[in-house]
Image: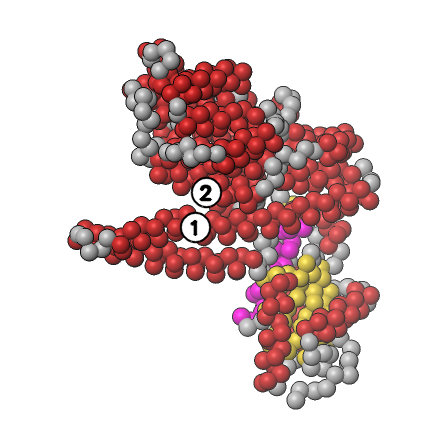
Amino acid sequence: MTALPDGADGPALQRAWELAYLDPPQARAFAVEALEVSAAGSLAAAWASWHIGLADVRASSLATARSSIQRARAGFQCHGSPRGLALCDEVDAIAARREGDTAACRALHDAIDQGPDPSYTDFDRFLAHNSRAITAKLMGEPERALSHFYDALQAAEACGWDGPRITAVGNLGGFHHDLFNLEDARTLSEQALTEAREAGARAMVTNSAANLIVIHHASGRPDDAMAMAKFLLEHPDEQLPGALERVALPIALAHLVNGAIDDADALLAGGARAQVADGDGRAFWAWLNARCLMTRGAHATARQIAEQMLQTCARTELPYDQMELLRAAADACEAVGDLAMALAHTKRAQALYQDLVGQGARARYRALQASHEFARVERQLDVAQRFRAEAETDRRRLVDLNRALEAKVAETQLLHAQLREQVLRDPLTGLHNRRYLFEVGPGLLELARRQRQPLCVTLLDLDHFKTLNDTFGHAAGDAVLTRFAEILQMHLRRSDVLCRYGGEEFVVVMPDVDADTAAQTMERVLQEFHAERVDFRRKRLPPCAFSAGVAAFPLHGDRLEHLLGRADKALYAAKEAGRARVEHARHSGFATLT
């Protein structure tokens, strides 16, 4: 539990400390009460002024915040309080960031960190790490931001007050969404929302629910997004005054993806707005507005809004919003017939998506490590080992800590394995990906060579897939890809390796199978896939088919690259011959099994 500083232990100041991150308006009210009963020039008056400044800067009342911090700084200088002076600098750094001057904010952080030790408490460490995390996030430094967010969580837990812990959990959940780690983002945000409602943390109730709207949208769960929006609209009593205006854009998103276009337009009419410290919200507003316009057929206007925003998009705009803005621009360009520009926007959006997927994997790895918890267990174990002989209570504590450490090591090993599996899986279909193919393929070929057994590589490509995407949209294409993957899995053996090779291409490696058998299997898959009717958004999509090329080891090659190349040529021949067929690769002149 955080100890209060000397001269700041009155009941009103005690409540101000406890409520600083739980309910800032109430914390400010208690600080004003403490200031009124404190002697002029006293240390208690300085701390009361500091709390007023902290509450005001978090509410974006920058002028009054700076005035209160100046009074607090004067008091701390008179009493020689390095901790108080450092915390005044921390509030000034937050004010600079609120004004958009992240460079000045970073300079203040560096000066504090490089200066004399201010003897921070756990609460102070939480405030400092939380502020540095947000600054690093806005400056495009995700790894640094993530490290500070976890340090803030550790300090908040040590502090023992609800406000810092709930804020740390909620901020960490929101940042994991920024990094496209949707699983941890949803878990942390739901935890923050539950705890915020129980503790009455009104600011975090709004922030967590708003974060969950965007997380549910990114996860393809529009009903859950609308449920969160309705919660915000139906529970204003659990939020700070004016909170709904700050989260109008997430609420508009929920209405948009559920077809309530008029309601979305009304919410967007207020212009670009964002939650505190999350950029200016212009890209978010632009892609939402463009999507609304496109639903009304105003594709040219939607394109103009999206492309104008792309030209002026600030560095502080989140990559996820930039990606959605590019996708909206691509769809608008396609609708007005500018296919070249649509392709250019799509390529940029895909590049951002790949970056986000990579960031998400790294963030997931960082979350699964739980390194701060692991380090804390290790430190406690070391302390217990040094004093093991002093008392029987310490001996029992050491046994417990050893068990905790063993469990954490086992958990970490399991999480490493889970992360590796995640990296080698295609997130849409759940199949293995190209990287997995090139990891296991050479080993399967070597095993076939040693055992003198055949092996086949089949390359499949969905026919007319671009036309399907252009006609029904990419979400419909994703539904077809997912169903095709399910059909493939039903027809293949567990020993076969099935991978999504890229786009609408798939690769199947079939050990101990000759070319004729492999082709027969693919013919059965083709028949069933062609007979399948995929339903999408209450519409039945037209029948689909694929073309395939089959190459056999060692007849067509003795390396995975050779076999893929021969299968690709056979696939091309199938396309040339009219599609919806399976072709054998031609003889390459390679030797038979030896």
Q: Which residue is mark 1?
A: 371
Q: Residue at x 82, y 44 (%)?
A: 340
Check disc 2 and give the amino acid type.
Tyr
Q: Is residue 450 above or below residue 399?
A: below
Q: Is residue 446 visible?
A: yes
Q: Residue at x 30, y 57 (%)?
A: 402
The label number, if any, that marks residue 504 in the structure image: none
Q: Horizontal and vertical percent for residue 522?
A: 66, 69
Majority SS type along the magenta span: helix
- SS class of the residue under badge 1? helix
- Given the current orientation, which residue lies at the most extreme left position? 392
Q: Residue at x 61, y 47 (%)?
A: 356
Q: Which part of the image, by quadrant, shows the C terminus?
A: bottom right
Residue 99 found in image quarter:
top right
Q: Is residue 243 visible?
A: no
What range is drawn magenta here? 477-494
Q: Which residue is mark 2?
A: 150
Q: Horizontal and vertical percent for residue 563?
A: 71, 74
Q: Are marks 2 and 1 in contact (CB under 8 Å)?
A: yes
Q: Is residue 479 magenta?
A: yes
Q: Residue at x 36, y 25 (%)?
A: 17
